Image (spheres, rainbow, N blue to C red):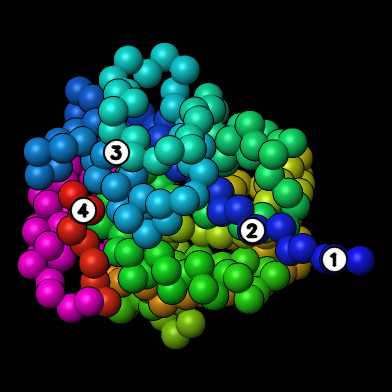
Amino acid sequence: MNERRVAERLWLIVPAAGRGRRMGAELPKQYLALAGRPVLAHTLSRLHQAFPEACLCLCLDPGDAHFDAGWVPFDQWRRSPGGVERADSVRQALAALAGEARDDDLVLVHDVARPCVTVADLHQLLAVLREDSAGGLLASPVADTMKRDDGYERVSQTEPRRGLWHAQTPQGFRYGLLCRALHEAVASGLEVTDEASAVEALGLKPRLVPGRRDNIKITHPEDLALAEHILAAQQGTSSPNHIYEETP
Ligand SMILES: Nc1ccn([C@@H]2O[C@H](COP(=O)(O)OP(=O)(O)OP(=O)(O)O)[C@@H](O)[C@H]2O)c(=O)n1
Ligand SMILES: C[C@](O)(CO)[C@H](O)COP(=O)(O)O
């Protein structure tokens, strides 16, 4: 019998249904202008540069009046309704892929608020994920000394920073595993601030894939200017490992 390997599909989930409360702007932060274009458009461009053939699922607030489909560079894409928390948005997106995504397809979840992720890091992450059944995430080792407060803005203790990492996105897992992990985590009342923590709760150890520290999550007002500087600096990089220019 002729066995033919079915081509692996890559799914991208971009949670973009947040309100940006900490940003405190009139618009949700994904629609704020960054170097002349909305944050959302930059983020989708970066993902598309790295994975032009992927299928995108974009989580949007059902009442979103700002979204413009012209910002989506993917041929294959759909939208799904956002939920109350980020994890709810991601679960809705996973549900929207049911029936099409196979259990062993890879799914990368990337915050819309991280427009500075590089193509090189995205490719590196995918290469690692293809070989690792527990999945993984971009992350960077903590560089500062870490303090725990006493609840009143005074230090109660200094935490050993050895072994501590900042979790970034994308975070990538096999579709079946991620569905199960998020379902069980939410059912058991776990606070799920990223996909990896749900997978960890199943007893697995996702891979920490060292990524650039400038893959920041735009969260507070000053982050917007910072992201603009990062994008400008990245555009000026000529190394072939750092392809940032948009394909014309
Ligand atoms: N119910 C939610 C909450 C968040 N997100 C998305 O999850 C990512 C990370 O969340 P965060 O940075 O906290 O964004 P916001 O929720 O918009 O910000 P804030 O917490 O300050 O309101 C963002 O891309 C955001 O759009 C989402 O899709 N659905
Ligand atoms: C997923 C994440 O970006 C990893 O750092 C982060 O946890 C999302 O943050 P939020 O502010 O809790 O939505």
Q: Does label 4 or label 1 sit earlier along the sequence?
A: 1
| Dots 1, 2 in contact, CB < 8 A | no
Query: Does any atom of ligand 1 lie closer than 8 Å to the CB of label 4?
Result: no
Compared to residue 22, the image places residue 111 above or below, namely below
Q: Does label 3 or label 1 sit earlier along the sequence?
A: 1
Please state if 173 lies on the left or on the right of 228 as rendered: right
Q: Does label 4 or label 2 sit earlier along the sequence?
A: 2
Q: Which residue is mark 2?
A: 8
In front of the other: label 4 or label 1? 1
Query: Which disc, if any, is residue 246?
Result: 4
Q: Which residue is mark 1?
A: 2
User: What is the spatial separation of the Cα atoms under label 4 and label 2, in whole angstroms?
Assistant: 25 Å
Q: Residue 5 placed where, x, y %?
A: 74, 63
In front of the other: label 2 or label 3? 2
What residue type is disc 4 on?
A: Glu
Residues in magenta? 214-240
| Number of marks drawn | 4
Name the secondary structure under disc 4.
Answer: loop
Name the secondary structure under disc 1.
Answer: loop
User: What is the spatial separation of the Cα atoms under label 2 and label 3, in whole angstroms?
Assistant: 27 Å
What residue type is disc 2 on?
A: Glu
Q: Nearer the viewer, residue 174 or 32?
A: 174
User: What is the spatial separation of the Cα atoms under label 3 and label 4, in whole angstroms?
Assistant: 15 Å
Q: For the point 27% across and 77% down, which residue is it?
A: 241
